Image (tube, rainbow, N blue to C red):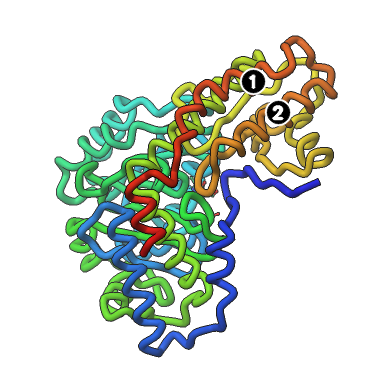
Amino acid sequence: MKYRLLSPGPTPVPERVLTAMANPIWHHRTPAFEATFQKCREGLAWLFQTKQEVLTLSCSGTGAFEACYQSLLSPGDTVITVNGGKYGERWGKMAQAFGMSAVVVDCPWGEAISVAAVEQALAAHPNAKAVVVCASETSTGVRHPYEAIAKLVAARPKCLMMVDAITALGVWDISPERDGIDVLVTGSQKALMLPPGLAFVTLSDKAWAMADESKNQRYYFDLKKERKNQKLNQTSYTPAVSLVEGLHEALRMMQEEGLERMFARHARLAAATRKGVQAIGLELFAKAPADSVTSVLQPAGIKPDAVYKGLMNRANVTIAGGQDAVKGKIFRIAHLGYYDELDIITVLAATEIILRQEGYTSFTPGAGVGAASEVLAAGFVNHKSDARAAAVVQG
Ligand SMILES: Cc1ncc(COP(=O)(O)O)c(C=O)c1O
């Protein structure tokens, strides 16, 4: 069977991007590379909706987060982290690894963090240097209220609002300046439609000022040094040149679609997936679902991980299962990046078949697909008659 990837990272890479990455390798200290890198810098500023520099790092998202801790904070600093899933938990552990003190605000998996709980933590730790929140906690499928938390942090001149937007940037409308985000991190293998290997960071003026005071150890990841070099269309060390070629093409594709239509597509695919699984009689795991990934509780009475494993082993569809406390109990269908309406129809149809094979039969075959297709119909438009698409095609 055809291989289909619907995991929340890595996500599928469009043919155009794959082809661009198959080009001969440019040497990075050449005008040709610099011209491409400049276009990427411009495209990233557009995608991130920022006037600040967006730095491109050759690492995964975790590496970019480490770069921020290393370049902005100091040993002994207090960092408030929101822990409602695997990634929120990671940022607390990472702070401790750098000799910082992590104040962890817990919330049950599947729920969004209470803003009041973060406010209390800030009141109890007025010297905190950062609040770290996942915009989209991929392990649970929850969207946390980072905008409301940012308002609390904005009033504190020595505290940074750090947002893990690794599965949020490109999915919905995020603007660091408008939303009060001081540190925004994302990775290539998510909505940016690239393979793993690049990560992106943008910082506010407040964060750059903190960089002047930071005493954490660093060498390879030095954001001040990167900014100086990247403004000249260079990187401090050898970049992942093929991925930069791919990034250039992926940004062109995103610009052809336009931000508004891109966000609307993600919202539509997410709404359709949620409606579809609910029409099969399943329950959403996330109480405040993000538009990047839909997490679903497996029905009672079937084997742990039956849907995730059934899809992988019998339909050649890779989605994601649950982790830690919800291992075997939930499955997660991604719809961030290079996905369209028919991908959602396909994964819902396959899920229905697997569920029936596993003995869960209390739904009418096609119920999920039918419910989803009502939402997805809005995406069936005549793209050829669209003025913006036509302009792009004609160059
Ligand atoms: C919300 C979130 N944060 C952090 C990470 C870690 O990123 P990476 O695996 O690129 O290091 C991921 C990866 O899935 C993620 O989804």
Q: Is any atom of residue 103 visible in this view?
A: no
Q: Which residue is mark 1?
A: 368
Q: In the visual, does 73 lie left or right of 27?
A: left
Secondary structure of residue under mark 2: helix
> Front-most of 337 and 392?
392
Q: Which residue is mark 2?
A: 349
Identified by mark 2, the residue type is: Ala
Q: Residue 381: image x %, image y %?
A: 45, 36
Q: Residue 18: image x %, image y %?
A: 58, 65
Residue plotted at (78% across, 29% down): 306
Secondary structure of residue under mark 1: helix
In this rendering, the answer to whether 72 lies above or below 131 is below
Q: Residue 115: image x %, image y %?
A: 31, 28
> Front-most of 355 and 85?
355
> Front-most of 239 and 210?
239
Instruction: Measure the alpha-carbon separation of dots 1 and 2.
Output: 7 Å
Q: Can you name the residue that lies furthest to the top here?
A: 362
Identified by mark 1, the residue type is: Gly
Q: Is mark 1 within 8 Å of ligand 1?
A: no
Disc 1 and disc 2 in contact, CB within 8 angstroms: yes
Q: In the visual, does 325 lie left or right of 242?
A: right
Residue plotted at (42% across, 67% down): 248
Residue plotted at (75% across, 30% down): 307
> Front-most of 53 and 269?
269
Residue 214 quadrant: bottom left
Residue plotted at (40% across, 28% down): 113
Identify the mark nearer the N-term, 1 or 2: 2
Image quadrant in which the C terminus is located: bottom left
Residue 383 quadrant: top left
In this rendering, the answer to whether 147 lies above or below 36 is above
